[in-house]
Image (spheres, helix red, strand yellow):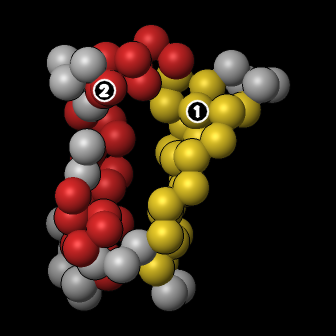
Amino acid sequence: MYPDIGACGAELEVSFDGENKSWLVHLKKGEHELEHHLEFVDAEDCLDGKQCVALGLEVSQLLNNIKGKQF
């Protein structure tokens, strides 16, 4: 979904959080980390290419932080 993640060398881990019934997306590169809870319905929309705005904004922010740029 976000090819820049692989290009910047960030580690990506996705797991299901049964307690919150959501997906936990964890990104890490060096000292920069992001954890984002993605609701099940939102994850389905992301995978279907419909909408993934909240996750996209957080990934973009993390990538900018890695590059030393801030919003």
Mark 2, Cα crowd under 10 Å, few <14 / some 14-19 / many 20+, is some
- Identify whether 64 is placed above or below 12: below
- Identify whether 59 is placed above or below 44: below
Q: What residue is at 34 percent from the left and 51 percent from the top?
A: 58
**Which quarter shows the C terminus?**
bottom left
Residue 63 seen by the camera: no
**Numbered circle sitting on residue 37:** none
> Looking at the picture, how far across and down is residue 46, in whole percent?
30, 26
Q: Is residue 10 left or right of 24 when viewed as pictured?
A: left
> Looking at the picture, how far across and down is residue 65, in whole percent?
31, 76
> Looking at the picture, how far across and down is residue 21, in whole percent?
68, 20
| Pointer 2 or 1: first along the chain | 1
> Looking at the picture, how far across and down is residue 60, in whole percent?
24, 58
Q: What residue is at 42 percent from the left and 24 percent from the top?
A: 43
Residue at mark 1: 23
**Which quarter shows the N terminus?**
top left
Cα separation between marks 2 and 1: 12 Å
Q: Amino acid at mark 2?
A: Cys
Q: Is residue 44 left or right of 38 when viewed as pictured?
A: left
Q: Residue furthest right?
A: 19
Residue 1 seen by the camera: yes
Q: What residue is at 24 percent from the left and 73 percent from the top?
A: 7
Q: Amino acid at mark 1?
A: Trp
Image quarter of residue 22: top right
Disc 2 secondary structure class? helix
Image quarter of residue 13: bottom right
Q: What residue is at 58 percent from the left and 32 percent from the top?
A: 23
Q: Residue furthest top?
A: 41
Disc 1 secondary structure class? strand
Q: Are marks 2 and 1 in contact (CB under 8 Å)?
A: no
- Identify whether 16 is placed above or below 41: below
Residue at mark 2: 46
